[in-house]
């Protein structure tokens, strides 16, 4: 599709987004993963891996929502970098802070 703007031709692309079927499928996947998160909480045998499992499932849900419902999958790669770059930096910062906290916390309590 081509439109005329101030004497310049501007090309726009139609159909660059997911179909309704895709959105419904993503919604079903999110519902199933949420149900699995609730179920895993009540299974006592999975207690040792509860937190890592919930974090992985939540991260997967987060990526699906960001990619499809926030349309990052269909936007310019620049927007993905602007979104995920600072997020990755924040994750590294929080992880490093937790490592430092738990490494030195027992020494602080002994004083």
Image: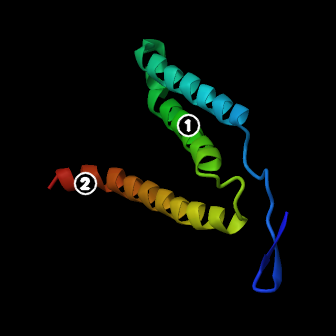
Q: Residue at x 81, y 86 (%)?
A: 7
Left or right, 55 with reference to 28? left
Using the image, tell me which numbered label, if any, was put on residue 90: none
* 72 relative to 56, above or below: below
Where is residue 76 shown, x and y percent of the image?
71, 65
How dense is the environment of label 2, judged by Cα within 10 Å: few (below 14), some, or many (20 and up)?
few
Report the residue marked by disc 1.
Answer: 56
Q: Nearer the viewer, residue 22 or 83?
A: 22
Disc 1/disc 2 C-alpha distance (Å) = 31 Å
Where is residue 66 shown, x and y percent of the image?
58, 49
Report the residue marked by disc 2.
Answer: 107
Q: Earlier in the sequence, mark 1 or mark 2?
A: 1
* Residue found at the far left of this picture: 111
Q: Nearer the viewer, residue 60 or 47?
A: 60
Left or right, 98 with reference to 82? left
Q: Secondary structure at mark 2?
A: helix
Q: Residue at x 49, y 32 (%)?
A: 54
Q: Nearer the viewer, residue 84 or 93?
A: 84
Left or right, 87 with reference to 72? left
């Amino acid at each position: 599709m081509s439109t005329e703007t101030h004497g310049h031709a501007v090309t726009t692309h139609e159909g660059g987004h997911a179909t309704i079927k895709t959105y419904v499928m993503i919604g079903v996947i999110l519902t199933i993963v949420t149900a699995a998160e609730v179920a895993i909480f009540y299974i006592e045998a999975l207690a040792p891996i509860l937190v890592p499992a919930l974090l992985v499932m939540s991260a997967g849900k987060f990526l699906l929502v960001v990619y499809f419902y926030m349309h990052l999958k269909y936007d310019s790669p620049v927007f993905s970098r602007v979104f995920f770059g600072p997020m990755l930096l924040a994750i590294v910062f929080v992880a490093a802070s937790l490592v430092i906290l738990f490494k030195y916390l027992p020494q602080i309590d002994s004083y």
